[in-house]
Image (cartoon, rainbow, N blue to C red):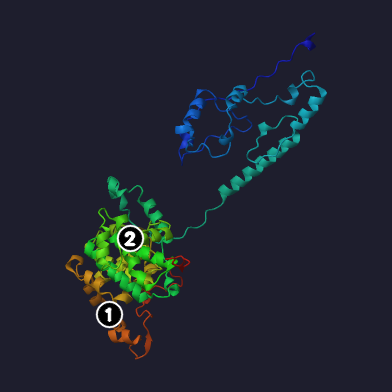
């Protein structure tokens, strides 16, 4: 008689259906949702009023759908039909695992269904750490042994990894530096909490916005002398408009990046320069000069329509990417380690603007130009050695700066070739930095001075009467400071050049 009674099934273990915070899935950068426990069936999402409200929120004005922050990442939401709500009502809220084989009897499983169920009970392959002992039934001895072996192997690998000795770390080049940002922790304008991440990002951006240092080889009508004339004219125009220093650096960067990708004629060179200054002023300045002012400084050579058309074309060529890391930003960072010395800062500005008129510095990143300018300014003003604190805040050790500083010093040992640039830093506003630096360079390195006659002949005569090319650097700062000369120089990315369309 007892055989006719139905056998009672073991109740399925229901998991907690407590909802988590919905913002935990909408925020980027937060921790991922907790994974279900090993061997447990996943709990289905609640299909109650919350689902109805989310469905209403997914529709916008005039029936258009608005995608959630991280909601519609797949095509599943796009194929939902209007009958899904009825289908969801029929779905169970919990997927019940089939009872173990020991609890199944012939009363509930006919012979045919028992054979099918036996095939379904074949263990599916899983990842080593995703499989646990509780996932295997008591009758599957092979699966139990396999899981045990995999667990032992994972434990052995983990213990081996933890027991491995750490590799010896190399001595940091800024060892012994002083933390100066902690003094600005209470000043929200200094953002001391994020300053390291900000400048790490700027050092990444500066490499992406560097021009091709040899683009003049592909220009048919231009040369480096004409590029220097344009840069000197932009420095004069920038001073007349009293614009920010960042505007000047960005304008020359736009010119060089554009010429790295397009070849132009000589008649369009000034148009490129005035348009680049116009774009940089609109990007950096609070009050940008009007386009009529730029037409005036160009001596009426171009109309406002030509400047606007050139602006659209240049921005399109540059892909509207104006995220240029100016050397002024790195100079402000290094000045913190220099106790904000105004004289060092002014002389360093002069050396930094040499990179605008001397094409040999196009391959050097702005952060390296700023660090070398501060180093050379301290050398001129006899401010002492390059301390570990300066190394930390500039990210460059002294041997890494000397190659860039040699080019800046070589420019100062030549006759002034850019009069407006020299006149700008000969004024009282800039402490007559150019005159002071040129006099110091000639007195310190008299054997390396190039005269106007040498420039005319195109040769430089050394102490022994031998003639050399003017491109040769005549001062060895590495030997002067006892450092070996490196073989790798900082080079920017090469950019393909194509002909201009108009």
Name the residue that disc number 1 marks.
415
Which residue sits furthest left? Answer: 428
Q: Is residue 10 above or below residue 496?
A: above
Front residue of 184/367: it is 367
Under tag 2, what secondary structure? helix
Q: Nearer the viewer, residue 193 or 351?
A: 351
In this view, 437 is above or below 198: below
Between circles 1 and 2, the one closer to the viewer is 2
Residue lying furthest right: 111
Q: Is residue 469 visible?
A: yes
| Quadrant in which the C terminus appears | bottom left
Does 461 appear above or below 101?
A: below
Give the side of residue 8 with respect to residue 365, left or right.
right
Disc assigned to residue 438: none
Q: Which residue is mark 2?
A: 305
Which residue is rendered at x = 38% and y = 76% of the image? 223
Alpha-carbon neighbours of circle 1 within 10 Å: few (<14), some, or many (≥20)?
A: some
Q: Is residue 383 visible?
A: no
Is 242 placed left or right of 74 in the picture? left
The quarter in which the N terminus is drawn is top right
């Amino acid at each position: 008689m007892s055989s006719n009674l139905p056998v009672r099934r073991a109740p399925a273990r229901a998991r907690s259906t407590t909802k988590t915070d919905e913002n935990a899935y909408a925020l980027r950068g937060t921790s991922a949702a907790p994974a279900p426990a090993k061997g447990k069936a996943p709990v289905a999402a609640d299909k109650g009023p919350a689902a109805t409200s989310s469905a209403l929120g997914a529709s916008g004005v005039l029936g258009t759908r608005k995608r959630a922050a991280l909601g519609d990442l797949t095509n599943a939401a796009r194929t939902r039909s209007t009958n899904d709500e009825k289908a969801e009502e029929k779905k169970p809220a919990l997927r019940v695992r089939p009872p173990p084989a020991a609890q199944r009897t012939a009363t509930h499983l006919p012979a045919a269904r028992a054979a099918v169920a036996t095939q379904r009970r074949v263990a599916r392959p899983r990842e080593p750490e995703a499989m646990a002992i509780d996932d295997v039934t008591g009758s599957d001895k092979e699966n139990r042994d396999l899981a045990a072996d995999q667990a032992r192997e994972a434990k052995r690998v983990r213990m081996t990894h933890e027991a491995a000795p750490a590799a010896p770390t190399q001595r940091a080049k800024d060892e012994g530096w002083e933390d100066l940002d902690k003094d600005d922790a209470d000043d929200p304008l200094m953002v001391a909490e994020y300053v390291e991440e900000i400048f790490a990002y700027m050092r990444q951006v500066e490499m992406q916005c560097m021009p091709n240092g040899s683009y003049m080889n592909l220009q048919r009508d231009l040369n480096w002398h004409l590029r220097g004339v344009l840069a000197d004219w932009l420095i004069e125009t920038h001073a007349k408009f009293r614009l920010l220093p960042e505007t000047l650096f960005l304008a020359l960067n736009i010119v060089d990046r554009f010429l790295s990708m397009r070849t132009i004629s000589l008649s369009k060179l000034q148009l490129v320069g005035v348009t680049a200054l116009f774009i940089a002023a609109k990007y950096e300045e609070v009050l940008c000069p009007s386009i009529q002012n730029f037409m005036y400084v160009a001596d009426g050579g171009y109309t406002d329509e030509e400047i606007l058309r050139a602006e659209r074309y240049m921005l399109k060529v540059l892909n509207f990417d104006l995220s240029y890391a100016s050397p002024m930003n790195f100079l402000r960072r290094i000045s913190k380690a220099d106790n904000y010395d105004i004289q060092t800062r002014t002389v360093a500005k002069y050396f930094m603007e040499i990179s605008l008129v001397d094409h040999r510095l196009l391959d050097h990143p702005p952060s390296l130009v700023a660090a070398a300018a501060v180093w050379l300014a301290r050398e001129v003003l006899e401010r002492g050695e390059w301390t570990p604190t300066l190394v930390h805040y500039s990210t460059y050790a002294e041997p890494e700066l000397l190659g860039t500083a040699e080019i800046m010093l070589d420019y100062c040992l030549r006759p002034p070739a850019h009069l407006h640039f020299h006149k700008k830093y000969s004024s009282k506003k800039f402490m007559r930095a150019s005159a002071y630096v040129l006099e110091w360079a000639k007195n310190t390195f008299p054997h390396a001075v190039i005269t106007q006659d040498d420039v005319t002949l195109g040769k430089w005569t050394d102490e022994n009467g031998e003639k050399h090319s003017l491109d040769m650097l005549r001062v060895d700062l590495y030997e002067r400071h006892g450092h070996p000369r490196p073989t790798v120089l900082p080079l920017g990315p090469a950019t393909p050049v194509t002909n201009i369309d108009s």
